[in-house]
Image (tube, rainbow, N blue to C red):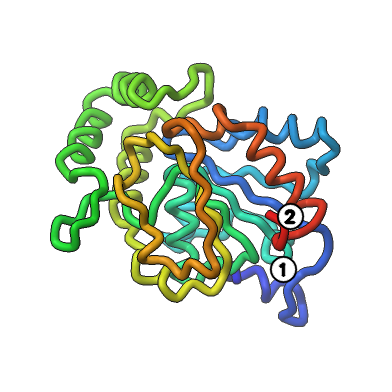
Amino acid sequence: MIDGLVEGCGDGSVLKGRASIVLVSGWSFDSSMWRNLVEGYVARGGDPSVIHCLDWLDFGHWIFDGTDCPVAKKYSGKNVLWLGWSLGGALILEALGRKKLSPHLSVILSASPRFLQDTATGWQGMPEKNWQALRRQVGRSPEAALAGFDAWLGLPAGCNRQQDVIALQQGLDWLAAVDQRTSLGRATTPIHWVFGSDDPLLPTQPWADVCDTERQLFTPLKGGHALPWRHEDYLMNLLLTFSARGIENV
């Protein structure tokens, strides 16, 4: 479970109660990227008190640097869904692999077990030279780098964005470091992969062969990397279903 949270329950037991949801933002976006999704969830009868929106930067520092846990105790309970987009999804995978998280369900949105290409094994991820080029561009001008990134992937304007060079490059370094292909073969918690059919940031071949497919579900959706905005209704219904019925029906 989440380090430091189970112990906070007094007797060491996990907290019980209503289903809780944690939404993790993607690289450069702060947690307000989920505002429309949460507002739609509430408008359809969802309880806003069970949702926590988490910045990727705080989450990454907890995973890689051992900083204080960025979420409250109730998110260590049994009936919790963690959903992360892009880097946020990759960080959830890293937390699972390090045994820092053990939710009953993780939804990995627009992310894969490994981001970078691995020519030794034939893994068709992003070429390292492309990743290095983006990292250098961030160092020269974060504004220009994000503008080009958004235009390439069709990401919306008007969102709050991280502009600090060190933070942005740190996020890219974390993304490059994640490689959970081995751990997914022995996954102990269910994972629901949701990804765009034309996402240029994902491997061209399916990665089901590295997963325990009995515990993992794959849902391709039409589109590219901007699924939180293009398929907001799908995600809203997923959250509502989880809140109402629990993980078995998500």
Camera-side residue of 216 and 31: 216
Q: Amino acid at mark 1?
A: Lys
Tell me, for residue 78, which label it has, or none: 1
Characterize the local packing of mark 1: few (<14), some (14-19) or many (20 or more) Cα atoms within 10 angstroms: many
**Could you say which is closer to the camera, residue 205 or residue 146?**
205
Q: In which quarter of the view is residue 141 placed?
A: top left
Question: Could you tell me the amino acid type at mark 2?
Answer: Ser
Quarter location, residue 43: top right
Hey, which quadrant is residue 75 in on the image? bottom right
As drawn, 39 above or below 190: above
- Looking at the rendered structure, the secondary structure element under dot 2 is strand
**Tag 2 residue:** 20
Image quarter where the N terminus lies is bottom right
Direction from residue 96 to residue 236 in the image, left or right = right
Q: Which mark is residue 6?
A: none
Horizontally, residue 213 falls left or right of residue 134, namely: right
Residue drawn 38% across and 27% down?
153
Distance between the Cα atoms at labels 1 and 2? Answer: 9 Å
Per the image, label 1 sits on a secondary structure element best described as: loop
